[in-house]
Amino acid sequence: MLIPAHAQSYFVFTSCCQAGDDGTLFGSITKSDVVALIKDQLDLSVETQDIEMGDIRTTGSHELSVKLHPEVVAKVRTVRNRSLIQ
């Protein structure tokens, strides 16, 4: 899949997860979770070692980087919302 350079500054992925009332996730978001989101929503294959991210253990917006090529790094924002069904 070719992505035009002018398309947008960020790709935003939104998903729901189980979390407590304070927004703390039951578990954490892993690089494998991000790989699956990118595959499902963009039909783009990336490897876990191409993802740079911090520890994601709360709902809300989190920024990470995905290396698409040695000279191309995409900025990605993932938004984790609390699931309505607990």
Image (spheres, rainbow, N blue to C red):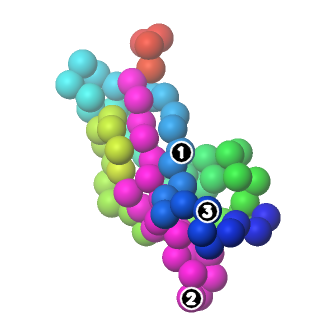
Q: Amino acid at mark 1?
A: Phe
Q: Earlier in the sequence, mark 3 or mark 1?
A: 3
Outermost residue on the top side: it is 85
Task: For marks 3 and 2, give the CA distance.
Answer: 18 Å
Question: Which quadrant of the figure contains the C terminus?
Answer: top left
Q: x, y percentage for residue 42?
A: 70, 52
Residue beneath disc 1: 13
Residue beneath disc 2: 71
Query: Label 1 crowding class (10 Å Cα cut-off): few <14, some 14-19, many 20+?
Result: some
- Secondary structure beneath label 2: loop
For the stretch drawn in magenta, what is the main secondary structure? strand
Residue 28 picture quarter: top left
Q: Earlier in the sequence, mark 1 or mark 2?
A: 1
Q: x, y percentage for residue 47?
A: 63, 67
Residue beneath disc 3: 7
Residues at circles 1 and 2 in contact by the CB criterion of under 8 Å: no
Outermost residue on the right side: it is 1
Task: For marks 3 and 1, give the CA distance.
Answer: 15 Å
Q: Amino acid at mark 3?
A: Ala
Q: Earlier in the sequence, mark 3 or mark 2?
A: 3
Query: Label 3 crowding class (10 Å Cα cut-off): few <14, some 14-19, many 20+?
Result: few
Residues at circles 3 and 2 in contact by the CB criterion of under 8 Å: no
